[in-house]
Image: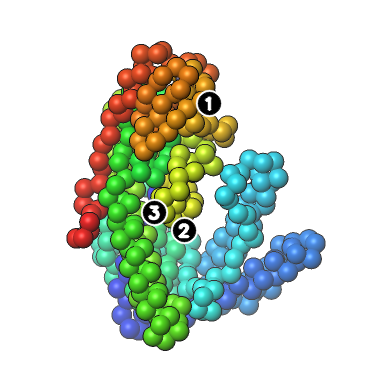
Amino acid sequence: MRRANIFKLKPTKEQEKKLFELADNCSRLWNEINYKRRQSFFSGEIDWNTDEEYNKYKHLIGSATAQQIIIKNNEAWKSYFALLKRKAKGKLPKYQNVRPPRYWKDRKKGKRVLRILIRNDCYKLGGDVLRLPLGLRIKWKGRNRWKGKQGRLEIVYDDLSKSWYALQPVEVKPLHQPIGNKKAYCDLGVRVPIMAEIDGEVIGFRGNSLLADWWYWTEKIAEHQSMLKETNDKHTSKRLRKLYRKRKRRFRHAVNTIVSRFVELCYSKGVSEIVVGDLNGIRENNTKGKKANSMIHNFWSHKYLVQRIKEKAEEYGIKVIEVNESYTSSVCPRCHSRNVFKRKRLFKCLNCGLEAHRDAVGCVNIAIGHAQTSRSAGVINGAVARPLLLSAEAGTSHASA
Ligand SMILES: [Zn+2]
């Protein structure tokens, strides 16, 4: 499996000048190749030839780096074509847009994105020095968390923090193997980001403080936006971009905490496969609450949640399957009647009388649908009425929560 180490670079003034120059040329090369490919693609047939661009840049950035950029652009186009195929076959979720590879350009600021690629055998990470081609020896800071076969190094300049970072992909082996053969069926939502049925038990992770935090920063963003508009009729500022980034990072941190606890729980219960419901059927889709909606419509947040579940599960050797058949939280898991009543956290079946915790219905229905078996009445009664709700968000609350 692939993981990445991230290091902060500490170049001297002289070194930074070189990095800027190198990155700018890398970015130009990428954009020139991509321009040619986009133009030829849109007018009928893609032109893969890059000899001209390679010869123009190999002396400026080194032939190995020029190659790496061409390879990365090839990969980007190939994955675009693969996605187009899957989309045509209806195999992609509705929310997923498919676009041809972009330019290395910050569209809002109109500036080139600064990025350098270094072939896996052209750099060496020493004690505190990163050895790069062109005799660059740059000090680095950070945690060398993943050890294994190193991949293509990516050096990027972050405009907001005015710093350079190096991303080092590493090929590592899973740390654990499943200890059992069970399945976890999980339904994703907003108030309870993960609710899962494991072996007749229903367990969820509360998202209260995650939501409160998200909303807190959303209000801060809104305040700053209206201030910008009133005082100088602007729509963006560095502070605004920092606020967006802060909200996203805190959200991701909270999601990671929940995902880690969930996957560790699965592992300890002997789960070898996690079945995740389709994102199109997100539990609270028809809630009218403003707060919940602002999160629901952020599909990236659910995409991120699934991606993190996959990555974390991989470390435990646990498989993750996304089910595409739609399931619903509006059908009684016991008698399958649609004649149900939902209010606040209560779900009540008007046909058989089942009373359940509303957020627990979805994952039980996924389990029934996927396993093609019904659950015994006893399991359904107890588990869906009283799911075990855990908090997993220590350290994510903010001062005013
Ligand atoms: Zn029923």
In the image, taking residue 80 as reference, residue 139 lies left or right, namely left
Q: CA distance from mark 1 to mark 3?
A: 27 Å
Snapshot quadrant of residue 126 = bottom left
Task: Please identify the residue farthest to the bottom as the structure is shown.
Answer: 232
Is 38 placed left or right of 199 in the picture?
right
Instruction: Name the image quarter holding residue 362.
Output: top left
| Residue occupied by mark 2 | 152
- Image coordinates of residue 235 in percent, x first then y, are 46, 78
Q: Neighbour class for label 2 at 10 Å: few (<14), some, many (≥20)?
A: some
Number of the label disc, if any, that sits on residue 291:
3
Which residue is the site of mark 1? Answer: 338
Tell whether label 2 touches label 3 (CB within 8 Å): no
User: Where residue 388 appears, x then y in whole percent?
Assistant: 28, 30
Q: How is the image coloured?
A: rainbow
Q: Nearer the viewer, mark 2 or mark 1?
A: 1
- Crowd rating for badge 3 (residues with CA inside 10 Å; few <14, some 14–19, many 20+): some
Q: Position of residue 148 (x, y in %)?
A: 37, 47
Camera-nearest residue between 246 and 147: 246
**Real-space CA distance between mark 2 and mark 1, rounded to the nearest whole angstrom:** 53 Å
Q: Is residue 67 above or below residue 184?
A: below
320 above or below 99?
above
Can you give x and y, in whole percent of width and height, for residue 220 in the image?
32, 68
Q: Kindly identify the residue that appears in the image at 34 percent across and 65 percent down.
A: 219
N-terminal label among 1 and 3: 3
Determine whether, in the image, residue 159 is placed left or right of residue 117.
left
Looking at numbered disc 1 in the image, what kind of residue is underneath it? Arg
> What kind of element bears circle 2?
loop
